[in-house]
Image (cartoon, coloured by chain):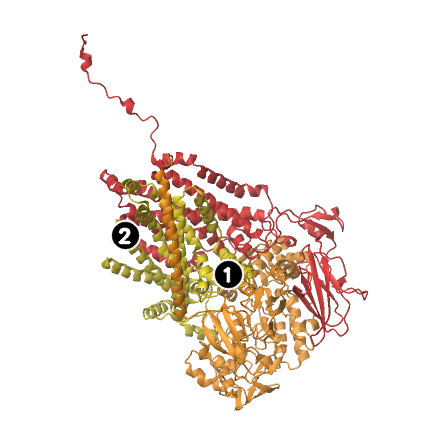
Chain colours: A red, B yellow, C orange
């Protein structure tokens, strides 16, 4: 048996070894933790790229693409992207009063080249005719006599000529002329297929910056009209330029307004829900009051109150008005959530540990309502954009010619079937913005939601 | 419970009174003149018109006269529809809007709960992605586009089929109600889907669910009585006022589908400065909204017993 | 989730099944709800058409109304929809026939003299309750329109009758109106001033007859419902569901038995949305619909028959001629006039085939001495000349003593065409003249209020005819006309307007209109934009629908269905 030598040192108590229990990573607060998680969240990253892209489009875009969004090119109205742009130079337009010498016997024919300036028709006078009616169709007239648009009714036997200037675009038209007797019976019918070519005068080309001096071109030369990568709208304005400038208004309103009114709604609702009792009732009744007020009426009042002159863009007042009239829904939602959360166990526990009310609300309750708040935020964005469009439409938002995506949508709807690009592009941009916020909302919720942590 | 309801009703009346007063004074301060028309009239005729509509009295007098009339249930005669009592307008057109609105909300509510639960359940799998894509599309497209497209689709369907499967516009039978109410409810349905999804996701991973599963409760019971019931609260919060909002906001759908509802009057009255109709519809809708909120709050207490209503 | 627990999957599928059951129940519940609501809605009694546009068996056509008719009391109505409805069910002394010429209606024959007129009424004209239509009914109807207590906005059209204006102002009693029923079927009218065009006025709805005993029996609700009106026209209103639909049946008591060929006209839809009506037309539910420039191509593709008519109205930019406004300056107005080309607006921007470029306040369809007024008195509107415009602009700056013009306000309405027009002109004036134009978009009532108070520099305005005589346009800018909201004052113009009002000789009157037209152009009082036309499509089997610039439009009283 070995003898164990014991010394005094053996009976000294051990020091507590804090090293074992030490936290090896820095201590993170809730928000710091959320931030880290957000940064590594794929969805949030994608949405960030989208937002940066949109901002670049808005701010940098106009510096690169310097076309004036208000410049109207009436010869290229509602042009789809990628349409043909060539035009021939011609002499300026002179009114036509029929050819003086017309060979008889050749029927309905062109008196001149058919151009986008005018199509001049003449036909043989029909004996006994009291009037002639001219029609134009985009499609073949056919045996069912689908004559198309009635252009004019001409009276008098000798007025056997007509100049058409209505909306001539470079395509094929089918003209028809019918001769009527005084009693309305039909005396003659002819059709003619006409191909129209696009033309422009040298002065107009100079004016639009297509050529530098007027001597550069002669009659008969070809020039290229201005390029519009995204097409043009109903007044011939460049879509790309309008989208870029419109982004400023739409993004500003679409982001600032929701942020502001959701913020206000959260503060209001959580206060009401937390305090409860009479304060809650009073707060909520006031919210009901605001919701029930007729929106349009009060928007008009705000406009007057802010003293917006005619034709000026009232963006800030519109922002204020939007915020003032939209916060109740959020506040009610948040209040409901707070009423629920208020009864949870951890709240009581926290209170017992000495937490103050403010701390409870900000640190415990609101993060748990994040899901609901973020959803509201996401939906508030397109809603704000469209409300702005509606208000601009009735004269209360941006004044023409300032564009905004929402008002471009409004205009684009009318020609949805014939020239869809006028609607599709602004709607696409709105969708992208909504998508960005949706993803951001998802990412934020994943990052902020304490309960999701263990399940990622 | 009854005491609470009574208290709420009284509060409701006071709220409606505030709404009426604010609207009345706002309306009279908006520039423009309800009596002006295309053809200018002489001063005498103008004076007679003002007399006829009681607009020549000082505004405070007008206010008290008007409030007195409301208490008797008389909202006056419309300025634009010169032979119709506002009461009649509301009485004849509100049921139409209400029916449209109720259907829209039911679609939105049931649909929202269904899709939302689906996406939460199959999170990150195919149903989730598809539904969320549709939701984003749904809220990015303004309501008048959806309505116009829906009507166009109906026309084409009828054309292709050769007979009228569903009416393209108008009102009267259940077939007339189907498409307009779906269009009307679409926006809210998208919102509710998202809300429900978010709400369910939080619950799906919460402690008490884990406890329930550990206890061995059958999955279906967990789903309905625990998950759904808790997740549905935000949806209910939104649903109540939604009914009021949808019923008022039915303007676009009513216009496109030629439906004789109250929404059209509500909007056009402001544009035409038809004072009596503005007041009548605002007060009526205000009362309706307040009532719906009371119903929702009562429902709240019933669904979640922990919520204390004072 | 890092670990896939088998029970999770089965949980999901169980929950999934639960959802499916829920969906099925929801579906069933909704169906039940809809049935219930449908029953509830039938109680409120607003079922609208499910019939086809043209029904041969019942000889009925289905059409639509743009809005609920606001006022069917003929002495008070002002709008076009009410006018169209009234044109089918109530008839005055004279009417416009399908060729838009004045034709006898309740009056069999008439005589217009310098200071008065006499109308002999037919004996077989009856009200829908069987009583004959008498001269007393006209006397009462006209007095009702002029009664100051009724505050009719169209009372001015009755001022042609002696003492009419004084009565309307309350200065004379109703009995002193210059119209008498000599007997039941003879009506004698005295004019306030010598008037050549009284017969054209008489076709207007404010001149319709009203039977006194029926009117009093309705106690202020005349025209409020189908049973609160008496009818003497080719149709009667058989049912009127406010805001939803209106139905007319053929009037068996109408004196002209062969005129109305349809048995019923069902206005089954009330909507102002052009796309909705077009869709209803495509779906074969209504018998006609208007076209916008956006649907034209679609209409041609579907090979529909497209018609057009001039709806009679003229649109122009009106200037504010009040003192202190820049636009009161003649040279500025000339500059603006020469910088514009209305042909470009109509042919390239608005692009509807019905529209004509604006050249004059007087539209092309007005009749002159023998032919059309505009042919006999060509407008000679100056062509666009930017250089000259700039010269005028410089002159204007000189006269006003300024270097640059302040922003000018262009007041505009909120409808789509106004928006396009205002944006177009904003750019045109900026491009050619360097002027800064602010667009003030207002809704209807506010735009009118601003016009009345003079709170604008330029305004997009328009005017539609009340009766078929150039004077309905010609007197617009007379200094006493309340509708002259720009307050243009020109004694020479006033002189010519008086000539046109008082002269009996047609040539002299038309010469006066020619002078008025010249002054309006030379002094650039307005900038005519366009004369509006409407393109529309009709069901191929519907024949005889009449569209009008003056009078009830559309008019189905002569329409029939072709088999």
Q: In which quarter of the image is residue B13?
A: bottom left
- Would you place residue C36 above or below residue A354 in this image? below
> Number of numbered discs present?
2
Q: Classify residue A132 as left or right of residue C438.
A: right
Q: Classify residue C33 as left or right of residue B254.
A: left
Residue A95 visible in the picture: no
Q: Nearer the viewer, residue A322 or B47?
A: A322
Q: Classify residue C431 as left or right of residue A346.
A: right
User: In whole angstroms, how far apart are the C-alphas of marks 1 and 2?
Assistant: 41 Å
Disc 2: which chain?
A: A
Q: What residue is pinned by disc 1?
A: C442
Is disc 1 surrounded by few (<14), some (14 to 19) or many (20+) residues within 10 Å?
A: many
Q: Quadrant of residue C419?
A: bottom right
Do the residues marked 1 and 2 share a common chain? no
Is disc 2 surrounded by few (<14), some (14 to 19) or many (20+) residues within 10 Å?
A: some
Quadrant into which the N terminus of chain B falls: bottom left
Q: Where is residue B245 in the image (x, y as percent from the top left)?
A: 40, 58
Q: What SS does tag 2 mark?
A: helix
In the rendered image, the residue lying farthest to the bottom is: C183
Q: Where is residue A145 in the image (x, y as percent from the top left)?
A: 67, 65
- Name the front one of labels 1 and 2: 2
Q: In which quarter of the image is residue B4?
A: bottom left
Q: What residue is pinned by disc 2?
A: A279
Disc 1: which chain?
A: C
Q: Which of C545 and C51 is in front in this view?
A: C51
Q: Where is residue C385 in the image (x, y as percent from the top left)?
A: 69, 58
Residue C554 visible in the picture: yes
Q: Position of residue C542 (x, y in %)?
A: 59, 72
């Amino acid at each position: 048996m070995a003898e164990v030598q014991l010394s005094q040192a053996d009976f000294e108590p051990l020091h507590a070894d804090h090293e074992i229990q030490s936290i090896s990573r820095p201590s993170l607060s809730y928000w710091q933790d959320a931030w880290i998680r957000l940064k590594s969240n794929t969805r949030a990253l994608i949405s960030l790229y989208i937002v940066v892209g949109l901002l670049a489009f808005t701010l940098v875009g106009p510096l690169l693409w310097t076309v004036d969004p208000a410049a109207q090119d009436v010869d290229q109205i509602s042009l789809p992207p990628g349409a043909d742009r060539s035009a021939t130079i011609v002499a300026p337009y002179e009114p036509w009063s029929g050819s003086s010498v017309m060979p008889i016997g050749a029927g309905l024919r062109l008196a001149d080249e058919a151009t986008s300036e005018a199509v001049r028709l003449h036909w043989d006078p029909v004996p006994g005719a009291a009037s002639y009616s001219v029609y134009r169709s985009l499609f073949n007239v056919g045996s069912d006599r689908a004559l198309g648009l009635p252009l004019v009714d001409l009276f008098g036997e000798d007025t056997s000529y007509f100049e058409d200037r209505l909306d001539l675009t470079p395509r094929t038209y089918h003209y028809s002329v019918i001769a009527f007797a005084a009693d309305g019976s039909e005396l003659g019918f002819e059709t003619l297929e006409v191909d129209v070519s696009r033309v422009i005068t040298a002065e107009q080309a100079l004016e639009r910056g297509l050529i530098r001096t007027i001597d550069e071109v002669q009659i008969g030369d070809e020039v290229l009209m201005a390029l519009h990568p995204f097409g043009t709208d109903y007044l011939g304005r460049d879509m790309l330029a309008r989208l870029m400038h419109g982004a400023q208004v739409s993004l500003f309103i679409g982001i600032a307004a929701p942020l502001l009114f959701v913020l206000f709604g959260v503060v209001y609702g959580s206060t009401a829900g937390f305090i409860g009792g009479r304060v809650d009732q009073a707060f909520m009744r006031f919210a009901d009051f605001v919701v029930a007020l007729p929106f349009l009426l009060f928007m008009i009042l705000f406009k007057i109150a802010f003293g917006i002159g005619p034709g000026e863009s009232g963006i800030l007042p519109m922002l204020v008005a939007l915020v003032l009239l939209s916060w109740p829904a959020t506040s009610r939602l948040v209040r409901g959530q707070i009423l629920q959360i208020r009864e949870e166990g951890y709240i009581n526990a926290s209170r017992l540990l000495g937490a103050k009310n403010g701390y409870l609300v900000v640190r415990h309750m609101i993060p748990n309502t994040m899901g609901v708040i973020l959803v509201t935020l996401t939906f508030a964005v397109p809603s704000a954009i469209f409300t702005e469009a509606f208000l601009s439409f009735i004269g209360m938002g941006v004044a023409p010619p300032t564009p905004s995506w929402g008002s471009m949508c409004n205009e684009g709807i009318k020609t949805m079937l014939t020239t869809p690009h006028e609607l599709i592009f602004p709607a696409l941009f709105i969708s992208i913005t909504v998508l960005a916020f949706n993803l951001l909302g998802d990412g934020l919720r994943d990052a902020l939601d304490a309960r999701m942590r263990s399940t990622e | 419970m009854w005491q609470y309801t009574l208290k709420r009703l009284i509060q409701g009346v006071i709220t409606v009174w505030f709404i009426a007063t604010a609207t009345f004074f706002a309306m009279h301060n908006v520039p423009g003149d309800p009596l002006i028309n295309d053809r200018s009239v002489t001063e005498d005729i103008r004076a007679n018109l003002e007399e006829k509509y009681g607009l020549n009295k000082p505004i405070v007098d007008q206010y008290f006269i008007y409030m007195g009339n409301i208490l008797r249930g008389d909202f006056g005669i419309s300025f634009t529809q010169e032979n119709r009592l506002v009461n009649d307008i509301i009485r004849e057109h509100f049921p139409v809007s209400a029916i449209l609105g109720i259907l829209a909300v039911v679609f939105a509510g049931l649909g929202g709960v269904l899709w939302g639960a689906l996406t939460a359940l199959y999170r990150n799998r195919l149903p989730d992605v598809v539904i969320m894509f549709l939701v984003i599309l749904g809220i990015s497209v303004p309501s008048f586009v959806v309505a116009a497209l829906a009507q166009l689709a109906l026309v084409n369907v009828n054309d292709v089929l050769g007979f009228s499967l569903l009416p393209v516009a108008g009102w009267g039978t259940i077939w007339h109600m189907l498409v307009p109410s779906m269009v009307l409810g679409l926006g809210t349905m998208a919102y509710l889907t998202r809300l429900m999804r978010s709400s369910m996701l939080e619950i799906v991973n919460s402690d008490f669910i884990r406890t329930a599963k550990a206890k061995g409760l059958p999955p279906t019971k967990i789903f309905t009585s625990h998950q759904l019931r808790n997740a549905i609260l935000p949806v209910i919060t939104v649903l109540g006022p939604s009914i009021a909002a949808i019923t008022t906001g039915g303007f676009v759908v009513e216009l496109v589908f030629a439906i004789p509802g109250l929404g059209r009057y509500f909007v056009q009255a402001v544009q035409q400065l038809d004072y009596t109709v503005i007041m009548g519809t605002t007060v009526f809708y205000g009362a309706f909204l307040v009532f719906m909120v009371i119903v929702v709050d009562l429902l709240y207490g019933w669904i979640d017993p922990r919520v204390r209503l004072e | 989730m890092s670990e896939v627990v088998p029970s999770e999957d089965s949980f999901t599928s169980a929950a999934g099944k639960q959802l499916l059951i829920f969906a099925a129940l929801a579906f069933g519940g909704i169906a039940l709800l809809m049935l219930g609501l449908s029953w509830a809605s039938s109680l409120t009694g607003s079922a609208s058409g499910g019939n086809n546009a043209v029904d041969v068996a019942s000889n009925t056509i289905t059409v639509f109304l743009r809005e609920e008719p606001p006022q069917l009391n003929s002495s008070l109505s002002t709008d076009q929809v009410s006018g169209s409805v009234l044109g089918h069910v109530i008839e005055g002394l004279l009417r416009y026939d399908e060729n838009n010429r004045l034709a006898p209606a309740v009056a069999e024959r008439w005589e217009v003299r310098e200071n008065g007129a006499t109308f002999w009424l037919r004996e077989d004209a009856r009200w829908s309750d069987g009583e004959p239509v008498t001269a007393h009914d006209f006397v009462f109807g006209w007095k009702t329109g002029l009664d100051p207590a009724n505050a009719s906005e169209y009372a001015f059209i009755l001022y042609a009758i002696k003492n009419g204006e004084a009565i309307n102002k309350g200065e004379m009693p109703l009995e002193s109106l210059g119209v008498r029923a000599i007997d039941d079927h003879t009506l004698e009218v005295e004019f306030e001033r010598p008037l050549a065009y009284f017969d054209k006025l008489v076709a207007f709805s404010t001149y319709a007859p009203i039977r006194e005993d029926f009117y009093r029996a309705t106690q202020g609700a005349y025209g409020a419902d189908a049973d609160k009106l008496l009818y003497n026209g080719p149709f009667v209103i058989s049912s009127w569901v406010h805001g939803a639909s209106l139905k007319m049946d053929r009037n068996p008591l109408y004196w002209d038995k062969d005129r109305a060929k349809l048995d019923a006209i069902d206005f089954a839809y009330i909507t102002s949305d052009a796309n909705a009506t077009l869709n209803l037309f495509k779906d074969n539910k209504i018998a006609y619909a208007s076209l916008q420039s956006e649907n034209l191509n679609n209409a041609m593709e579907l090979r529909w028959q497209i018609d057009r008519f001039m709806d009679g109205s003229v649109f122009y930019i009106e200037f504010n001629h009040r003192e202190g406004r820049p636009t009161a300056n003649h040279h500025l107005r000339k500059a603006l006039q020469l910088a514009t080309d209305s042909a470009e607006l109509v042919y390239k921007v608005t692009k509807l085939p019905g529209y004509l470029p604006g050249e004059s306040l007087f539209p092309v369809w007005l009749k002159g001495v023998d032919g059309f007024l505009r042919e006999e008195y060509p407008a000679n509107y100056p062509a666009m000349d930017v250089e000259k415009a700039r010269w005028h602009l410089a002159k204007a700056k000189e006269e006003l003593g300024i270097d640059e013009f302040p922003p000018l306000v262009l007041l505009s309405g909120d409808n789509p065409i106004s928006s396009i027009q205002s944006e177009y002109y904003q750019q045109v004036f900026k491009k050619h003249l360097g002027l800064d134009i602010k667009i003030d978009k207002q809704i209807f009532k506010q735009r009118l209020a601003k016009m009345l108070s003079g709170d604008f520099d330029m305004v997009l305005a328009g005017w539609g005819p009340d009766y078929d005589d150039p004077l309905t346009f010609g007197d617009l800018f007379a200094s006493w006309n309340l509708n002259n909201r720009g307050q243009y004052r020109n004694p020479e113009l006033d002189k010519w307007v008086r000539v046109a009002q008082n002269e009996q000789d047609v040539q002299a009157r038309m010469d006066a209109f020619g002078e008025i037209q010249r002054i309006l152009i030379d002094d650039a009082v307005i900038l005519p934009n366009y004369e509006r036309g409407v393109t529309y499509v009709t069901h191929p089997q519907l024949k005889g629908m009449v569209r009008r610039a003056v009078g009830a439009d559309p008019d189905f009283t002569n329409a029939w269905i072709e088999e």
